[in-house]
Image: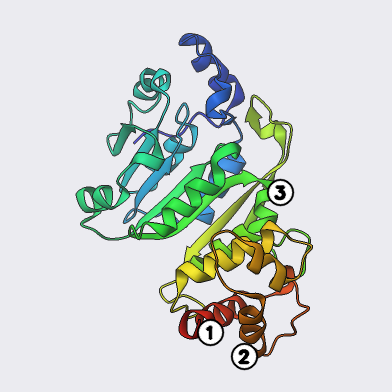
Amino acid sequence: MAEPYLGNPLRCETVLRKFGFSFRKKFGQNFLIDSDVLEGIVDAAAVDEEDVVLEIGPGIGSLTQYLASRARRVISVEIDRALLPILDYTLADWDNVRIINNDILKTDIRAIAGEENGGRPLKVIANLPYYITTPIIMKLFENGAPISSVTVMVQKEVADRLAAKPGSKAYGAITLAVQYYASVEPVIEVGPESFIPAPKVSSAVIRLNRYEEKPVTAAHEDILFKLIRGSFNQRRKTFVNGAANFEGLSYTKDDIRAALAHAGLPESIRGEVMSLAEFAAVADYLGENS
Protein backbone atom coordinates (compact mmCIF):
# COMPACT_ATOMS: atom_id res chain seq x y z
CA MET A 1 0.00 0.00 0.00
CA ALA A 2 1.26 3.49 -0.86
CA GLU A 3 2.44 6.02 1.68
CA PRO A 4 0.33 9.15 2.28
CA TYR A 5 1.81 12.18 0.54
CA LEU A 6 -0.77 14.96 0.84
CA GLY A 7 0.55 16.12 4.22
CA ASN A 8 3.02 18.11 2.13
CA PRO A 9 1.82 21.64 1.21
CA LEU A 10 3.62 21.70 -2.14
CA ARG A 11 2.06 18.41 -3.22
CA CYS A 12 -1.39 19.64 -2.23
CA GLU A 13 -0.94 22.81 -4.24
CA THR A 14 0.32 20.79 -7.21
CA VAL A 15 -2.82 18.64 -7.15
CA LEU A 16 -5.09 21.66 -6.90
CA ARG A 17 -3.36 23.33 -9.86
CA LYS A 18 -3.46 20.13 -11.91
CA PHE A 19 -7.25 20.07 -11.68
CA GLY A 20 -7.77 23.83 -11.71
CA PHE A 21 -9.74 23.59 -8.48
CA SER A 22 -11.37 26.73 -7.04
CA PHE A 23 -12.39 26.85 -3.38
CA ARG A 24 -16.10 27.36 -2.79
CA LYS A 25 -17.07 29.42 0.24
CA LYS A 26 -20.51 27.85 0.51
CA PHE A 27 -18.88 24.52 1.45
CA GLY A 28 -16.50 26.04 4.02
CA GLN A 29 -13.48 24.38 2.39
CA ASN A 30 -10.17 24.48 4.26
CA PHE A 31 -7.89 21.52 3.45
CA LEU A 32 -5.32 20.20 5.93
CA ILE A 33 -1.71 20.33 4.71
CA ASP A 34 0.13 19.40 7.94
CA SER A 35 1.35 15.81 8.26
CA ASP A 36 1.76 16.08 12.03
CA VAL A 37 -1.87 17.14 12.44
CA LEU A 38 -3.12 14.48 10.02
CA GLU A 39 -1.24 11.75 11.90
CA GLY A 40 -2.44 13.23 15.19
CA ILE A 41 -6.08 12.92 14.13
CA VAL A 42 -5.67 9.28 13.12
CA ASP A 43 -3.82 8.54 16.37
CA ALA A 44 -6.48 10.32 18.45
CA ALA A 45 -9.20 8.23 16.82
CA ALA A 46 -7.17 5.07 17.55
CA VAL A 47 -7.76 3.76 14.02
CA ASP A 48 -6.51 0.23 13.36
CA GLU A 49 -6.83 -2.50 10.72
CA GLU A 50 -10.15 -3.72 12.16
CA ASP A 51 -11.93 -0.39 11.83
CA VAL A 52 -14.40 0.88 9.27
CA VAL A 53 -14.17 4.66 9.26
CA LEU A 54 -16.82 7.11 8.09
CA GLU A 55 -15.05 10.26 6.95
CA ILE A 56 -17.04 13.46 6.46
CA GLY A 57 -15.68 15.93 3.93
CA PRO A 58 -12.51 14.33 2.52
CA GLY A 59 -11.68 17.38 0.40
CA ILE A 60 -8.78 16.38 -1.86
CA GLY A 61 -8.09 13.25 0.19
CA SER A 62 -5.32 14.41 2.55
CA LEU A 63 -6.75 12.82 5.69
CA THR A 64 -8.29 10.00 3.65
CA GLN A 65 -4.82 8.78 2.62
CA TYR A 66 -3.73 8.54 6.26
CA LEU A 67 -6.96 6.80 7.27
CA ALA A 68 -6.81 4.32 4.40
CA SER A 69 -3.25 3.41 5.37
CA ARG A 70 -4.44 2.30 8.82
CA ALA A 71 -8.11 1.29 8.60
CA ARG A 72 -9.71 -1.79 7.07
CA ARG A 73 -12.15 0.37 5.12
CA VAL A 74 -12.85 4.11 4.70
CA ILE A 75 -16.20 5.48 3.54
CA SER A 76 -15.85 9.17 2.66
CA VAL A 77 -18.89 11.38 2.13
CA GLU A 78 -18.17 14.46 0.00
CA ILE A 79 -20.80 17.01 -1.01
CA ASP A 80 -18.79 18.84 -3.71
CA ARG A 81 -18.93 17.06 -7.09
CA ALA A 82 -15.95 19.11 -8.28
CA LEU A 83 -13.73 17.17 -5.86
CA LEU A 84 -14.65 13.71 -7.18
CA PRO A 85 -12.08 13.56 -10.02
CA ILE A 86 -9.41 14.82 -7.63
CA LEU A 87 -10.28 12.10 -5.12
CA ASP A 88 -10.16 9.47 -7.88
CA TYR A 89 -6.63 10.66 -8.61
CA THR A 90 -5.27 11.09 -5.06
CA LEU A 91 -6.75 7.82 -3.78
CA ALA A 92 -5.92 5.66 -6.78
CA ASP A 93 -3.31 3.73 -4.77
CA TRP A 94 -5.78 2.72 -2.04
CA ASP A 95 -8.38 0.07 -2.82
CA ASN A 96 -10.12 0.23 0.58
CA VAL A 97 -11.82 3.61 0.04
CA ARG A 98 -15.37 4.29 -1.14
CA ILE A 99 -16.45 7.82 -2.02
CA ILE A 100 -20.10 8.80 -1.66
CA ASN A 101 -21.14 12.08 -3.28
CA ASN A 102 -23.81 13.33 -0.89
CA ASP A 103 -24.67 15.75 1.89
CA ILE A 104 -23.87 14.03 5.20
CA LEU A 105 -27.11 15.45 6.65
CA LYS A 106 -29.00 13.45 4.00
CA THR A 107 -26.87 10.30 4.23
CA ASP A 108 -28.17 7.07 5.79
CA ILE A 109 -25.35 6.26 8.20
CA ARG A 110 -27.11 3.18 9.55
CA ALA A 111 -27.26 1.76 6.01
CA ILE A 112 -23.53 2.39 5.56
CA ALA A 113 -22.76 0.58 8.82
CA GLY A 114 -24.91 -2.34 7.65
CA GLU A 115 -23.34 -2.55 4.19
CA GLU A 116 -19.74 -1.96 5.20
CA ASN A 117 -19.40 -3.25 8.76
CA GLY A 118 -22.16 -5.77 9.37
CA GLY A 119 -24.09 -3.21 11.43
CA ARG A 120 -21.22 -2.81 13.90
CA PRO A 121 -20.25 0.69 15.07
CA LEU A 122 -18.27 2.99 12.80
CA LYS A 123 -15.60 5.46 13.83
CA VAL A 124 -16.44 8.89 12.46
CA ILE A 125 -13.61 11.27 11.56
CA ALA A 126 -14.03 14.68 10.00
CA ASN A 127 -12.63 18.12 9.29
CA LEU A 128 -15.99 19.85 9.61
CA PRO A 129 -17.02 23.08 7.87
CA TYR A 130 -17.40 25.56 10.71
CA TYR A 131 -20.78 26.86 9.55
CA ILE A 132 -22.47 23.47 9.89
CA THR A 133 -20.54 21.83 12.74
CA THR A 134 -23.42 21.66 15.25
CA PRO A 135 -26.07 20.15 12.92
CA ILE A 136 -23.66 17.45 11.79
CA ILE A 137 -22.55 16.48 15.30
CA MET A 138 -26.13 16.35 16.55
CA LYS A 139 -27.28 14.27 13.56
CA LEU A 140 -24.56 11.73 14.27
CA PHE A 141 -25.81 11.17 17.81
CA GLU A 142 -29.54 11.78 17.59
CA ASN A 143 -30.42 9.38 14.78
CA GLY A 144 -29.20 6.33 16.71
CA ALA A 145 -26.80 5.13 14.00
CA PRO A 146 -24.07 2.73 15.24
CA ILE A 147 -21.11 5.02 16.02
CA SER A 148 -18.45 4.39 18.66
CA SER A 149 -16.61 7.71 18.49
CA VAL A 150 -16.49 10.97 16.57
CA THR A 151 -13.08 12.60 16.13
CA VAL A 152 -13.46 16.01 14.54
CA MET A 153 -11.63 19.18 13.66
CA VAL A 154 -13.76 22.15 14.69
CA GLN A 155 -13.34 25.85 15.37
CA LYS A 156 -11.48 26.30 18.69
CA GLU A 157 -14.41 28.25 20.11
CA VAL A 158 -16.76 25.32 19.37
CA ALA A 159 -14.36 22.83 20.96
CA ASP A 160 -14.32 24.98 24.10
CA ARG A 161 -18.12 25.00 24.18
CA LEU A 162 -18.41 21.24 23.81
CA ALA A 163 -15.98 20.58 26.66
CA ALA A 164 -17.27 23.37 28.95
CA LYS A 165 -18.31 22.97 32.58
CA PRO A 166 -21.39 24.48 34.30
CA GLY A 167 -20.88 28.12 35.19
CA SER A 168 -18.22 28.81 32.58
CA LYS A 169 -18.65 31.41 29.84
CA ALA A 170 -18.48 28.74 27.11
CA TYR A 171 -21.18 26.54 28.72
CA GLY A 172 -24.38 26.43 26.67
CA ALA A 173 -27.14 24.39 25.10
CA ILE A 174 -24.80 22.60 22.66
CA THR A 175 -22.56 21.62 25.61
CA LEU A 176 -25.40 19.80 27.33
CA ALA A 177 -26.79 18.29 24.14
CA VAL A 178 -23.46 16.70 23.18
CA GLN A 179 -22.51 15.68 26.72
CA TYR A 180 -25.81 13.82 27.00
CA TYR A 181 -24.56 11.44 24.32
CA ALA A 182 -20.76 11.43 24.62
CA SER A 183 -17.77 12.33 26.72
CA VAL A 184 -15.65 15.14 25.26
CA GLU A 185 -11.89 14.70 25.01
CA PRO A 186 -9.82 17.65 23.70
CA VAL A 187 -6.90 16.38 21.60
CA ILE A 188 -4.83 19.09 19.89
CA GLU A 189 -5.06 22.74 18.92
CA VAL A 190 -4.34 23.59 15.29
CA GLY A 191 -3.26 26.96 13.90
CA PRO A 192 -4.42 28.51 10.63
CA GLU A 193 -1.08 27.73 8.96
CA SER A 194 -2.01 24.02 8.87
CA PHE A 195 -4.70 24.66 6.24
CA ILE A 196 -5.07 25.82 2.69
CA PRO A 197 -6.58 28.38 2.48
CA ALA A 198 -5.73 29.49 6.02
CA PRO A 199 -8.88 30.21 8.08
CA LYS A 200 -9.12 33.36 10.16
CA VAL A 201 -9.59 31.42 13.41
CA SER A 202 -7.78 28.70 15.32
CA SER A 203 -9.07 25.13 15.25
CA ALA A 204 -9.01 22.14 17.57
CA VAL A 205 -9.39 18.40 17.31
CA ILE A 206 -11.73 16.76 19.81
CA ARG A 207 -12.81 13.18 20.31
CA LEU A 208 -16.40 12.47 21.33
CA ASN A 209 -16.69 9.00 22.87
CA ARG A 210 -20.27 7.78 22.66
CA TYR A 211 -21.64 6.50 25.96
CA GLU A 212 -22.85 2.92 26.08
CA GLU A 213 -25.06 4.13 28.94
CA LYS A 214 -25.95 7.81 29.13
CA PRO A 215 -24.59 9.68 32.17
CA VAL A 216 -28.11 10.65 33.29
CA THR A 217 -31.46 8.91 33.10
CA ALA A 218 -33.99 11.15 31.36
CA ALA A 219 -37.45 9.65 31.13
CA HIS A 220 -38.64 12.73 29.27
CA GLU A 221 -35.92 13.60 26.75
CA ASP A 222 -38.18 15.95 24.79
CA ILE A 223 -38.84 18.08 27.87
CA LEU A 224 -35.16 17.95 28.85
CA PHE A 225 -33.97 19.44 25.57
CA LYS A 226 -36.72 22.06 25.48
CA LEU A 227 -35.78 23.17 28.99
CA ILE A 228 -32.14 23.42 27.93
CA ARG A 229 -32.99 25.49 24.85
CA GLY A 230 -35.39 27.70 26.80
CA SER A 231 -32.87 28.33 29.54
CA PHE A 232 -30.04 29.37 27.20
CA ASN A 233 -32.35 31.24 24.85
CA GLN A 234 -32.47 33.88 27.58
CA ARG A 235 -29.16 33.14 29.23
CA ARG A 236 -29.09 35.99 31.74
CA LYS A 237 -32.59 35.34 33.04
CA THR A 238 -33.35 32.90 35.83
CA PHE A 239 -34.17 29.34 34.85
CA VAL A 240 -37.79 29.94 35.91
CA ASN A 241 -38.22 32.89 33.54
CA GLY A 242 -36.32 31.30 30.66
CA ALA A 243 -38.33 28.08 30.78
CA ALA A 244 -41.68 29.80 31.35
CA ASN A 245 -41.14 32.14 28.38
CA PHE A 246 -39.99 29.47 25.93
CA GLU A 247 -42.56 28.83 23.18
CA GLY A 248 -41.95 25.10 23.14
CA LEU A 249 -43.03 24.69 26.78
CA SER A 250 -46.37 25.33 28.47
CA TYR A 251 -45.45 25.20 32.17
CA THR A 252 -46.30 27.97 34.61
CA LYS A 253 -43.69 29.58 36.78
CA ASP A 254 -45.21 27.79 39.76
CA ASP A 255 -44.78 24.44 37.95
CA ILE A 256 -41.14 25.20 37.33
CA ARG A 257 -40.51 26.43 40.87
CA ALA A 258 -41.99 23.19 42.22
CA ALA A 259 -39.71 21.16 39.94
CA LEU A 260 -36.65 23.09 41.08
CA ALA A 261 -37.61 22.61 44.73
CA HIS A 262 -38.04 18.88 44.14
CA ALA A 263 -34.51 18.77 42.67
CA GLY A 264 -33.14 20.71 45.65
CA LEU A 265 -32.40 23.82 43.58
CA PRO A 266 -33.17 27.48 44.45
CA GLU A 267 -35.78 29.27 42.36
CA SER A 268 -33.22 32.03 41.62
CA ILE A 269 -30.87 29.64 39.82
CA ARG A 270 -29.82 30.28 36.22
CA GLY A 271 -29.55 27.52 33.65
CA GLU A 272 -25.93 28.40 32.95
CA VAL A 273 -24.86 26.91 36.29
CA MET A 274 -27.06 23.80 36.18
CA SER A 275 -25.58 20.39 35.46
CA LEU A 276 -27.04 17.92 32.99
CA ALA A 277 -28.28 15.78 35.90
CA GLU A 278 -30.09 18.79 37.40
CA PHE A 279 -31.78 19.62 34.09
CA ALA A 280 -32.87 15.97 33.81
CA ALA A 281 -34.28 15.93 37.34
CA VAL A 282 -36.38 19.02 36.63
CA ALA A 283 -37.54 17.64 33.28
CA ASP A 284 -38.63 14.34 34.78
CA TYR A 285 -40.56 16.03 37.58
CA LEU A 286 -42.41 18.23 35.10
CA GLY A 287 -43.10 15.26 32.86
CA GLU A 288 -44.59 13.25 35.69
CA ASN A 289 -46.46 15.99 37.58
CA SER A 290 -47.70 18.62 35.12
Q: Nearer the viewer, mark 2 or mark 3?
A: 2
Q: CA distance from mark 2 to mark 3?
A: 35 Å
Residue 240 appears at what percent x and percent y?
Answer: 70, 73
Of labels 2 and 3, earlier in sequence is 3
* Residue matched to label 3: 157
Q: Residues within 10 Å of mark 2 (few under 14, many from 20)?
A: few
Q: Is residue 16 positioned above or below 286 on the image? A: above
Say which residue appears at 61% left-offset and 24% top-offset: 9
- Residue 129 or 50: which is nearer the viewer? 129
* Residue matched to label 2: 262
Say which residue appears at 60% left-offset and 65% top-offset: 228
Residue 59 appears at what percent x and percent y?
Answer: 47, 29
Q: Is residue 96 positioned above or below 18 on the image? A: below
Q: Is residue 234 positioned above or below 205 on the image? A: below
Label 3, secondary structure: give it. Answer: helix
Do the residues under discs 2 and 1 have CB atoms within 8 angstroms? yes
Q: Is residue 182 left or right of residue 185?
A: left
Amino acid type for the residue under numbered disc 3 = Glu
Amino acid type for the residue under numbered disc 2 = His
Q: Is residue 98 left or right of residue 189?
A: left
Q: CA distance from mark 2 to mark 1?
A: 8 Å
Label 2, secondary structure: give it. Answer: helix
* Residue matched to label 1: 285
Say which residue appears at 50% left-offset and 81% top-offset: 290
